[in-house]
Image: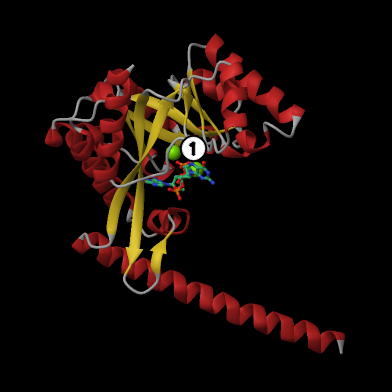
Amino acid sequence: HAKMAGRRRVSIFGAQMDDAIQNRAAIEAELREALRTKTGLSVVYQPKYAIDGVRMLGAEALVRWQHPERGPISPAVFIPVAEEANLIADLGLWVLETACRDAMDWPVEHLAVNVSPVQLRSAGFAETVFAALAKVGFPASRLELEVTETDFADAEEIGVENIKTLTAAGIAIAIDDFGTGSSTFERLREISFDRIKIDRSFVKNITESEGDAELVRAMISMAHAKGLKTTAEGVETAEQRDILRSFGCDELQGYLLGKPMPPTQLIQVFGAGLAATAAM
Ligand code: C2E
Ligand code: MG
Ligand code: MG
Ligand code: MG
């Protein structure tokens, strides 16, 4: 009986695997088509605020894909597909150009764009970024690229070279999801970067866990000692904001302050901010 059950389990698992593979193949084909026709893809922007919660310092571009039948598909699902299907270079470039065009006249210090490790590790990536900036006329000094910490841990020579070339041109580098990766301090010493973005999982626990609060405090002071700026990701409550403020965190991002939104809506937020400042 045990053997039968075991075999049945295996076959059910096998069927699920087949479904997953088919689903993935379909997503890949549909994403390729979406990218070719530029339909269903868009870029939304999440504001990044100074610690006062009033001054908007920047905005982070986040790609969206609205599938005609499946509805919205999360980037957490389709970015890995794009990476494996050799579509990430095209997708990443499209996001970068779209974001630079959108953000051209925005009254913020920086535009942040996420970069896949696959892009970062490809030869000529830095030059691709420069070409995109030149095409749109967006200044390098206003661009910040976000790379996840894990990517630094196993960054190869090309990745390190790309980062050096980008930073030499005035582009800022932020380490995304800081605290979740496995970067050695030696690795971090080798690469020059500008900001750490403290992962949402730490921010989430900051009010409940003394340990996590201490870790966040330590991350912020370590970053400051190294001359780096700090951004807290996923700030959802006023309590979290207040603790982060007491720790001297530089920048806040999260649903408490603003969700990712289309550019038309973000422009209205600028308007409201300016009105608030004028009224003071
Ligand atoms: P990320 O760069 O760490 O972006 C933060 C994610 O957290 C975003 O999810 C954002 O919508 C979400 N978020 C922001 N504030 C809050 C909050 O207060 N609470 C909660 N629960 N979530 C919050 P999203 O847009 O689904 O993106 C997921 C990930 O996909 C991103 O993580 C990034 O790694 C990747 N991604 C998104 N757009 C791009 C892109 O254009 N290129 C690349 N390579 N990756 C991208
Ligand atoms: Mg990011
Ligand atoms: Mg993040
Ligand atoms: Mg992430």
Count every numbered label the image shows and give the total.
Answer: 1
Residue 57: percent from the left, percent from the top? Answer: 36, 24
227 sits to left or right of 127: right
Residue found at the very far front of the displayed protein: 279
**Residue 6, image x and y in percent?**
78, 82
Q: Residues within 10 Å of mark 1 (few under 14, many from 20)?
A: many
Q: Residue furthest right?
A: 1
Image position, residue 28 (x, y; %)? 37, 66
**Of residues 196 and 21, which is closer to you in this image?**
196
Q: Nearer the viewer, residue 5 or 146?
A: 146
Disc 1 marks which residue?
254
**Quadrant of the drawing holding the N terminus:** bottom right
Residue found at x 76% / y 27%: 210
Q: Where is residue 54 shown, x and y percent of the image? A: 40, 24
Left or right for 43, reference 131: right
Q: Between residues 252 and 110, which one lies in front from this camera angle? A: 252
Quarter of the image holding residue 56?
A: top left
Left or right, 84 with reference to 275: right
Q: Amino acid at mark 1?
A: Gly
**Which residue does the image show at 61% across and 26% down from the upper left?**
184
Colouring mode (rainbow / by chain / secondary structure / one colour): secondary structure
Q: Is residue 216 above or below residue 120?
A: above
**Vertical order, 87 against 26 (above or below):** above
Q: Residue at x 62, y 39 (%)?
A: 201
Q: Residue at x 22, y 44 (%)?
A: 98
Q: Is mark 1 within 8 Å of ligand 1?
A: yes
Q: Quadrant of ligand 2?
A: top left
Circle 1: element type? loop
User: Dividing the image into 4 quarters, which one contains the C terminus?
Assistant: top left
Q: In which quadrant of the rendered view does residue 30 lie? A: bottom left
